[in-house]
Image (cartoon, rainbow, N blue to C red):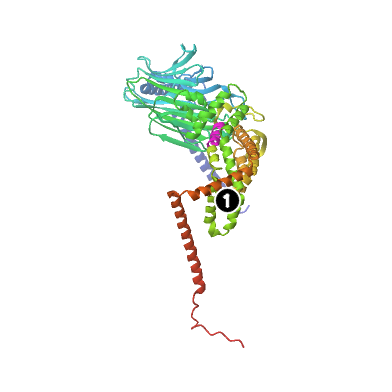
Amino acid sequence: MDKKTLIGLLIVGVILFGYSFYNSKQAAKYQEEVYRADSIDRAEHPERYAESLPESAESQALRAELEARQQADEQAKQDALIASLGESLVAASQAEAQTYLLENDVMKVWISSRGGEVTNVELKDYTRGDLQHKGDPLMLFKEGSAKFDMELFIKRSFNTAQINTTDYVFTDARITEQPLADDGGVSRSLSLRLPVNPETGAAIEYVYTLYPNDYMVNFDVNFIGMEPYTSNLTFFTFDWEATSLQNEKGFKNENMYTTVAYRFPDARKIHELGASDGEKEEKITTKVNWVSFKQQFFSSIFIADDNFADASFGYKTAKPNSGEIKDFAATFTVPYDPAQTNYAFRFYFGPNQYSILRSYDLKLEKVIPLGGSLISWINTGLTINVFNWLSKFISSYGIIILILTIMVKLIILPLTYKSYMSSAKMRVLQPEIAEINARYPNQEDALKKQQAIMALYKRCGVNPMGGCLPMLIQLPVLIAMFRFFPSSIELRGQHFLWADDLSSYDSVLNLPFNIPFYGNHVSLFTLLMALALFFYSKMTYKQTEAAGPQMAGMKFMTLYLMPILMLCWFNSYASGLTYYYLLSQLFTILIMWIIRYSVNEEKLLAKLQDNAAKSDRNAASKPKSKWQLRYEEALRQQQEMQRQRQQQAYGGSQKAHTAKPQSTKNQPPKKRRK
């Protein structure tokens, strides 16, 4: 080994020794820091290491010290709560809740002692109609979604404490029964108390009362001995939340009728938040009588006998196929009077049935969308009464709709006959109208042609609007039926022919895909209705064509477009409605066919010609009225103005043709031909 190699090995050895020495010093320092941090953590949080210590007198003492410290902390928190709320409220916040049941002939109401709130309601006479839960008991709310909280401030010795009843368990639950003198039934009441001070008897009491065969639940709030605690209170509030379940077959149709409705005191009409997708909210700063979480066929309504001071409410729409429709939320403000110890409220949990809702005389029946003033009058005065009367004798609502259709057609038969006769008169006058069109072929004579046609109609006693006015008069009846059938709970779950529910669509074929503007199923009643409309339009097309070329130009719209639009529009609507429209169209075709073959058009033409002759004789012998003279003068002036415009246009064109040619002085001379 030479000298250089030895020196190199020596240097490498020194470096390795130095690195090892330095690394050991750093490791010792790191362990010291870890031990120091661990010691600090053990001192600050000994509970983390108490279980890992070996059993010894020292570890037992440490555990005892930890338990004593935890108990002291909990006791300090408990003492702070007691100082702020009192022992009774603190005990109520830690008590175990129980659920109580109030029941009568038509519904079950579950009430929890936590917050004293209604957690759910079952309507005994109805079942769910959605495809996933068809036949299940009908519950108004999703399980665990209902919340009813009263918020107020109470005065303590050294502070003011906020109370939210959902944080506390009501005690002293008592269910009592009271015989009724009227019909021998029994009313059942559940009283719950939230003790504020047991020594003085101060408490907040809820009392729910349910009467036989009734969907209304009386809800009384009693302030018992609360004067020392509510002397500074000016109002208290209620927060009400619930998630409505999908109870019908079609999500889209049910969602369209699900919204928040409310009524102002003594108002004849109600207001709605509007039914749509997404979210909506509104705040009312004036008094409100009641607020409803309204679905297509069922409603949950909170009513204040002395009105709410104000209210705010809203909803969020659930996703299709989730089994839910909307999440509702509402907040109500109630004025507080220290001299008033009882506040009366009511809950309506039940069907949107006109006769039931109207019996409470609170305009609750307005939640049923029966249309505006005229449309609503037709439904309440005719349709509902006929349905209720016929249902006493006939169990099939399909037959009831058939009888109702016949009754409506008989009522409007004079209008139908008048409409047909007006079209027939214009049709038999087609030869005379063709002569007038030939007499005035030019576009500038359009006014004269129209005057001549109107004069012909007048001489013959024909009203060109006679076919339109009867149809316009029938329109309110059609709209009334459009409003009635989708909102009629009487049709819910009623079978007829292939339809298993007349309040929903009748699907005879479910498609594996969705067609835009149509859906993913085939409704047979809707398909038949569209075909009937097509054949009716085809049958009456010649009559509308006789009214003039303008009507004939609407052939595509009336003959093809309208049936297609009706097919797409009504495919997801109530089958009871499309069944009614189908029957109405078939009866109209039958009536028009009978009228057509019972009217002799030759005799009708002879009568019109006789009317024209009489009109000519009367016009010759009878002086013209002032109105007729003014009308003719206005027409003459209009014709004169049109003639002047034509002359000006003709004169301008003549001047253009006779204008002098431009000077050719500066123009180069034309080359002569050789």
x and y, in percent, of residue 62 in the image: 46, 22
Q: Residue 274, relative to residue 46: is it above or below?
A: below
* Near-viewer residue (651 or 16): 651
In the rendered structure, which amino acid carries the disc numbered 1? Gln
**Residue 359 among those drawn in magenta:** no
x and y, in percent, of residue 651 in the image: 49, 68
Dot 1 crowding, Cα within 10 Å, few <14, some 14–19, many 20+: few
Instruction: Tell which residue pokes out farthest to the bottom in this image.
Output: 674
Q: Is residue 388 left or right of residue 520?
A: left
Q: Residues in magenta?
A: 476-486
Label 1, secondary structure: give it: helix
* Near-viewer residue (397 or 472): 472
Q: Residue 627, relative to residue 498: is it above or below?
A: below
Instruction: Tell which residue pokes out farthest to the front in this image.
Output: 621
Q: Residue 371, relative to residue 163: is it above or below?
A: below
Q: Quadrant of residue 134?
A: top right
x and y, in percent, of residue 645 in the image: 48, 62
Identify the residue shown where x is 42% and y is 49%: 626
Identify the residue shown where x is 48% and y is 60%: 642
Magenta residues, dominant SS class: helix
> In which quadrant is the C terminus drawn?
bottom right
Residue position for label 1: 550
Can residue 516 be seen in the rendering of this structure?
A: no
* Near-viewer residue (189 or 480): 480
